[in-house]
Image (spheres, rainbow, N blue to C red):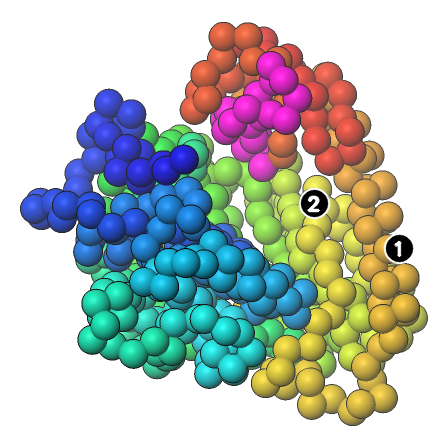
Amino acid sequence: MSSPIVTLRRPQDRGTESAPAKAPVPLTRRAYIETYGCQMNIGDSELLAGALADRGYLQVSAPELADVIVVNTCAIREHAEQRVLGRIGQLQQARRNRPDVVLAVTGCMAQRMGSDLLEKTSGVDLVAGPDSYRRIADLVDGIREGGIERGQLLLELDEEENYEGIPSIRGKGTGAWVTVQRGCDHRCTFCIVPYVRGPEKNRSPEEVLAEVRAAVGAGYSEITLLGQTVNSYRHGDVRFSELLEEVARVAGVRRVRFTSPHPNDVDDALLDVMAAEPAVCSQLHLPVQSGSNRVLRRMVRRYTREEFLEIVERVRSRVPGIALSTDVIVGFPGETEVDFEATLDLMRRVRFDDAYLYRYSAREGTPATRLPAGDFLDEEISGRRLSALIALQREIQREIHESEIGSVVEVLVEREARTEGDLLGRTEANKVVVFPAGRVRIGAFVEVRLRSTTGATFLGTVVR
Ligand code: SF4
């Protein structure tokens, strides 16, 4: 069944959006976009939907219905790339007997693999990196009309490209992703991002605020500001803390989050805004990656374990009760049992509310792949360490969540839960709560008493 994106923007559904005054292009063709990876990629898919809609492409929900199929990919781990390669094979089936359909692969994996992607797969017509989306509709049209050959590569990184002027077309939901920064100036040795997304580029505060106002006008009450190191944002004299404050004060914004910050850029000005602005959620993602100074140095994370712990202390003292989450990579080349113990110890000390835990994945072209061959760990060792870390974090999370049972929290209702008759929402601390629907509507803010926890998720009942 097709789900035309234009219906999501009807005023009766989402209020009146202050869209730029532009004659609408008739939506005569259809695009299917499938997204892999992080929130930045979700934001980019919304941008791609906007760029294609500008040229008359209506978004549909199944590849069989589309004139162009876009697979927006992630390169952060090998596993993610393998999944996409498998999926490209399946999508060939979806366009069997429809030779006019264009299959485009976009995003970080497209940028990383380039022409290899054309060689390793059959039937990919267009490979486009994260700075090429403005041109994608031209290429798709040209390929469909026969004026441009299949097998095109659009891979230039553009230091100026911020996609100003292309309105995103957002998916269903209560929250809007707003990209404020693209690219990254750091060079963490495990990370492919700087090579596939280029250096940091920051959007103007005016453009960001206009997008936030448009999103609020369209009915979104929660805004998440996105950037690879979002809190290093700077545009002219405007720092991230100032941008955040402005966004939080836009009428109609009930909640603001941001991801992913770099620990080194958590300054007092940012914490002051977090403490003072009611709309800024009391929640912070603070990627640590390792608890060992030796590993942090080899990762070039630019902080020590002690400095990270000091940042956590400062955050907690200035924003009491804040929920913290993190990312950790285990099995980085050369990680010893002592290093891993230091990570476990850091996790016990900080007691994060949530953690995204991964096994190191070597990404060709990153500095870590050039470490001595003998440093690379057996999968058995890194797998065992990952399991131990997951077990520890689950225990910590369960203890934290059990201590919260009985409290009443405000929940933004996001969608129906898997259990029939229940709804699912998130607290300000970004914790998931499932509760009987009653008369509650999706998109509403309700007060929910937390009754029990499965460890990660809460079960509750609406009190107001
Ligand atoms: S800060 Fe490090 S981990 Fe984050 S995107 Fe930049 S290079 Fe990658």
Q: Amino acid at mark 2?
A: Asp
99 relative position to 37: left or right:
left
Residue with the mark numbered 2: 354
Question: In the rendered view of the protein, which quadrant contains the N terminus?
Answer: top left
Callout 2 environment at 10 Å: few (<14), some (14 to 19), or many (20+)? many
In the rendered image, residue 454 lying in the magenta stretch gets the answer no
127 relative position to 306: left or right:
left
Q: Residue at x 85, y 41 (%)?
A: 395
The foreground one among 202 and 418 is 418
Q: Position of residue 427 (x, y in %)?
A: 57, 30
Residue with the mark numbered 1: 388
Whether residue 135 is visible, yes or no, is no
In the image, which residues are magenta? 412-430
Q: Amino acid at mark 1?
A: Ala
**Quarter, ligand 1:** bottom right
Compared with 400, 158 (above or below) is below
User: Who comes first in sequence, dot 2 or dot 1?
Assistant: 2
Q: Residue at x 82, y 51 (%)?
A: 390
Q: Residue at x 63, y 40 (%)?
A: 323
Compared with 156, 254 (above or below) is above
386 relative position to 226: left or right:
right
Viewer-nearest of discs 2 and 1: 1
The foreground one among 299 and 150 is 150
In the rendered image, residue 425 lying in the magenta stretch gets the answer yes
Q: Position of residue 189 (x, y in %)?
A: 63, 79
